[in-house]
Amino acid sequence: MAENKDKDIVMKCRHMEKVYPGTKALDDVDFNIYRGKVNVLIGENGAGKSTFLKILAGELEPNKGSVFITPGERMAVLKQDHFMFDEFEVVETVLYGHKRLYDIMKEKEALYAKEDFSDEDGIKVSELEGEFAELDGWSAESNAEILLNGLGVTNEFHYVKMKELTGTQKVKVLLAQALFGNPDILLLDEPTNHLDLHAIKWLENFLMDFENTVIVVSHDRHFLNKICTNIADIDYGKITMFVGNYDFWYSYTQMTQRQLKDQNKRVEQKIKELQEFIQRFSANASKAKQATSRKKLLDNLQMDTIKPSSRRYPFCSFKQDREVGNDVLLVEGLSKTIDGKKVLDNVSFMIRPNDKVAFVGKDEIARTTLFRILMGEMEPDEGTFKWGITTKTAYFPKDNAEYFDGCHDSLIEWLRPFAKEGEQYDADIRGWLGRMLFSGEEALKEANVLSGGERVRCMLCKMMMSGANVMILDEPTNHLDLESITALNEGLMEYKGTLLFDSHDHQFTQTIANRIIEILPGGIIDRQMTFDEYIESEEIDAIREKMTGEA
């Protein structure tokens, strides 16, 4: 096959090892990366995905082994430092993505600005102009502007300094920087973080048309399924390559695990039968030969040597103590201004039993503000809301710092105040924590030392214990690995109560929501339909454009 020819290899990893104190992140990693493939790197949080990308990018050195890049291949990396280019203009920041082209432009500018322009300078300029033309330098600025506009950074921001942009705009500019100049190898670490739906869709289309090599880490399953051709799975410090998208990999691994489990069950049953026979008849002379032969069989009978995955999936199951009545929530004319900007403008809607409502829109602050008002954490400027008398609510805030910062309690003690009567005992609380993968000594961790993902799992544990019939979740998939997102996704699909939530995870929203409410300047769009139906609706686009002037 052509794929196996050396000319198609753009990068080789040979016997690569990376060790941190107490753990081996990568262990004898050895494989090739081929031209034109979109390689998605997956693994549990802490498995070594970002470490591997940094080694490929040359930002980290492995303890052993090496990375070989085919000579002449240009690599581009999505920068994670959002303040690195604060003094650069936006277009200039994008151009910096092709460092050689950028350096030529700066060198040309310096030479042309010289008052004592010499013959040698003229020869140098001529050489630079030739290389500049070869690199398509005359189209560079217009190409940079096309990328920026595609990602939603419009013309009025192209020549302002980076420090004047919002955090979300900076993310988009840095992404445009990585994409600029058609790099041969593109390294992207969580490229959809902080992107709106329009920008994610644009990026999906860009990468699907991109003919060179991509290596990407992302927790967005819809995005992964759209773009990827190969899965690189990090487990036990090793990297195993699979052809196909994320859903194919997930289905395949789940099927393999089931088959292995079934096979081992059969082996275990056989072992048990043989052991019972040996025990029963080994002292019986007439059966001694049979017992001996069965003992030999038992010695040769082994469990399957396939190493099971190290991945652990949390168990997310949300049960309501009682069903909600007909009256759930009535919102009338809510308005709220924050820092001089009206984030909620005359918002009105009614929530019914069994509604699973996804709140969408470009303004994250608007959604968080609405949720905080509904939970009594903030007062509206205008309007009212009323919960039904049978409702019991539980809230998952986007910012959970107040629950953990400065708290030195163990997780058992942290969770105890949220336990129902009769469930305050350590064994009961450990049971809840175990569902969220805090078993054994992990349950004794201090709350203030938890990672972002661990904090989210604790908050979900609290939600499960609540027995609420109405839950409000503000970006619950943030900080979670793919395994935890999948478990939460399945748990909320099974939840029988009413749900109000927002999420950047396309698949999460599509599979859970039966109703979409988009918060816009001047009001809302409210439709009983799936997320995919909503974003593909031309009628919705027309209404949005009428309300905002944007398609």
Image: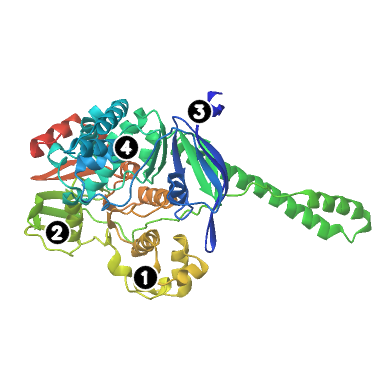
Position of 508 relative to 469 (above/below) = above
- Please state which of the two labelled residues, at mark 4 or mark 3, is closer to the viewer: 4
Dot in front, 1 or 2:
1
Camera-side mark, 3 or 1: 3
Asked which secondary structure carries label 2, the reply is strand
Q: Is residue 7 left or right of residue 306?
A: left
Q: To which residue does mark 3 refer?
A: 8
Query: Which badge, 3 or 2, comes first in the chain's sequence?
Result: 3
The spot of residue 485 in percent (x, y) is 39, 50
Residue 505 visible in the displayed image: yes
Of mark 3 and mark 1, the one earlier in the sequence is 3
Judge by depth and name the residue closer to the eye, 440 or 163: 163
At a point 53% along the width and 23% down the height, the residue shown is 2
Which residue is label 4 attached to? 98
What is the distance, in whole Å, between disc 1 and disc 2 at their CAs?
35 Å
Find the residue positioned furthest to the right: 285
Q: Are marks 3 and 1 in contact (CB under 8 Å)?
A: no
In the rendered image, residue 148, in percent from the top left (x then y), is placed at 22, 37
Quadrant of the frame with the C terminus: top left
Sequence-first disc among 4 and 2: 4
**Quadrant of res 179:** top left
Q: What residue is drawn where x is 28% and y is 36%?
A: 104
What is the three-letter code of the residue carrying label 3? Asp
Q: Which residue is mark 1?
A: 448
- 1 and 4 marks in contact (CB < 8 Å): no
Crowding at mark 4 (Cα within 10 Å: few <14, some 14-19, many 20+) = many
> Residue type at mark 1?
Asn
Q: Secondary structure at mark 3?
A: helix
**Disc 2: CA contacts within 10 A as few (<14), some (14-19) or many (>=20):** few
Tell me the residue that label 2 is attached to.
386
Mark nearest the camera among 4 and 2 is: 4
**Amino acid identity at mark 4:** His
